Image: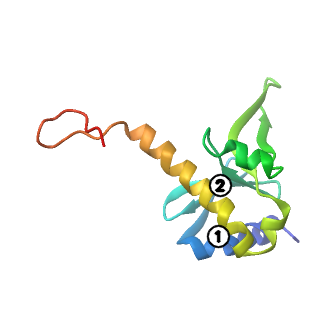
Amino acid sequence: MANSAEFVAHCLDLLAPLGQVRARRMFGGHGVYLDDLFIALVVDETLYLKADDTSRSQFEQGGCQPFRYRTQDQRTVSLDYRSAPGDAMESPGLMRPWARLAQASALRSAAAKRGPRKSARTGRADRR
C-alpha cells in the first residue's frame, strides 16, 4: 500500500460485507468499528483483530501475531488483538471468518463490561 490512508481504506473494504464499518484515528493508528463495535486496530500497515480466551487459539493456529507496543519506560505490553492472516488481507471472503471471530470476541468483551442483566420484575441478576 502506498500510504496509511490507503491501507485503512483497504481494511474497511475487506470488512464492509459484514456491516457498517468505520475507522477512527487513535494512538498513532486507527480503531476499526463494525456496527459501532470496536473490533480491530490498524497500526503500522497491519490489521489487528480483537481476540479473547475463546478465540485466541484459532488466531494462533492461523499464525496471527499479537499486537505489542513499548511504553515510555521500555516495557513491552501485549493486547488481545492479533494480526490478520496474510491471505485474509486479499479478499472479503477470506477475511470474513477472521472478522467474525473478532466480532464475537468484542461482543463477549462488551457483555462482560456490562455485567449480568437485571430482571425488571425482581431487580436481581437475570441468569439467562
From the top left corner, tell me how far across and down residue 84 is, in percent.
Answer: 77, 57
Q: Amino acid at mark 2?
A: Ala
Q: Is residue 118 above or below residue 28?
A: above
* Along the viewing direction, whichever of 54 and 43 lies nearer the viewer: 54
From the top left corner, tell me how far across and down residue 33 is, in percent.
Answer: 57, 60
Query: In the image, 94: left or right of 38?
Result: right
Disc 2 to disc 1, C-alpha distance:
10 Å
- Callout 1: helix, strand or loop? helix
Q: Is residue 62 above or below residue 90?
A: above
Quarter of the image where the N terminus is located? bottom right
Quarter of the image where the C terminus is located? top left
Query: In the image, 22: left or right of 95?
Result: left
**Residue on which disc 1 sits:** 15
Extreme residue in the right direction: 2
Location of residue 100 (image quadrant):
bottom right
Extreme residue in the left direction: 121
From the top left corner, tell me how far across and down residue 38 is, in percent.
Answer: 56, 54
Location of residue 74 (image quadrant):
top right
**Residue on which disc 2 sits:** 40
* Along the viewing direction, whichever of 78 and 56 lies nearer the viewer: 56
Q: Is residue 86 above or below residue 112?
A: below
Q: Amino acid at mark 1?
A: Leu
Query: In the image, 63: left or right of 47?
Result: right
* Along the viewing direction, whichever of 48 and 24 lies nearer the viewer: 48
State the residue at coordinates (49%, 65%).
35
State the residue at coordinates (78%, 45%).
60
**Residue 71 seen in the current view:** no
Using a 10 Å C-alpha cutoff, classify the residue at mark 1 as few (fewer than 14 neighbours), some (14 to 19) or many (20 or more): many
- Callout 2: helix, strand or loop? strand
Whether label 2 touches label 1, CB < 8 Å:
yes
Query: Does label 2 or label 1 sit earlier along the sequence?
Result: 1
